Image (cartoon, rainbow, N blue to C red):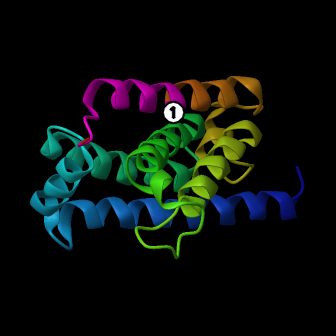
């Protein structure tokens, strides 16, 4: 891979990572803090809300940190895919495509989901922990399948087990 491609992957990884770390931190420590996040999750039908507030916040922080480092990139991408698919299903899907619609549409979570899918397949690039330690290197199907099976499968299992929206 050339330097421009490696720099591009680094920029994409770090920008998505910043979004996820900040979002996870917000779920835990800002706004309504963890108690407010738990009430919000309960309102979406994710029960018990406190479990899902902590789970989402810690997953976003850990997946974002791993992605920024380019460490275990397919696992980080699975965390991103899983949290975004759950957000898509529980909150954004019913609001239509555009994020500026009332309730926020799904365009934003869709982009983050599929950026993670793409990164899982192409890998973290030369400037990453994965490359330095030889993890998921060379990139390809193993990383892609790890991220998509764990991410989409984990989200489906979580929704089937815990999502009980009001009728």
Nearer to the camera, 92 or 135:
92
Q: Which residues are magenta?
A: 151-166
**Residue 82 falls left or right of residue 41:** right
User: In the picture shown, does residue 139 fall above or below 57?
Assistant: above
- Name which residue lies at 14% across and 58% down: 34
User: Residue 23's quadrant in the figure?
Assistant: bottom left
The quadrant in which the C terminus is found is top left
Callout 1: helix, strand or loop? helix
- Name which residue lies at 16% across and 53% down: 38
Nearer to the camera, 89 or 32:
89
**Residue 50 falls left or right of residue 163:** left
**Residue 108 falls left or right of residue 12:** left
Q: Main secondary structure of the magenta part?
A: helix
- Name which residue lies at 17% across and 40% down: 51
**Residue 80 falls left or right of residue 98:** left
Residue farthest to the left? 35
- Residue 149 spot, x, y in % from top left: 57, 24
- Residue 100 spot, x, y in % from top left: 52, 76
- Name which residue lies at 58% across and 67% down: 15
- Residue 104 spot, x, y in % from top left: 46, 67
User: In the picture shown, does residue 86 fall above or below 28?
Assistant: above
Residue at the disc numbered 1: 151
Residue farthest to the right? 2
Nearer to the camera, 23 or 84:
84
> Is 102 in the magenta?
no
């Amino acid at each position: 891979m050339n330097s421009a491609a490696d720099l591009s992957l680094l920029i994409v990884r770090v920008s998505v990572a910043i979004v996820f770390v900040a979002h996870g931190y917000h779920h835990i420590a800002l706004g309504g803090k963890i108690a407010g996040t738990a009430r919000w999750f309960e309102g979406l039908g994710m029960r018990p809300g406190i479990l899902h507030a902590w789970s989402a916040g810690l997953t976003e922080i850990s997946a974002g940190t791993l992605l920024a480092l380019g460490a275990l990139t397919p696992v980080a991408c699975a965390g991103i895919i899983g949290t975004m698919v759950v957000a898509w299903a529980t909150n954004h899907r019913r609001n239509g495509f555009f994020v500026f619609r009332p309730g926020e549409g799904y365009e934003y979570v869709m982009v983050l989901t599929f950026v993670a899918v793409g990164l899982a397949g192409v890998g973290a690039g030369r400037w990453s922990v994965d490359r330095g330690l030889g993890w998921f290197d060379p990139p390809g199907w193993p990383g892609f399948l790890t991220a998509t099976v764990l991410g989409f499968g984990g989200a489906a299992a979580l929704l089937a087990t815990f999502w009980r929206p009001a009728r």
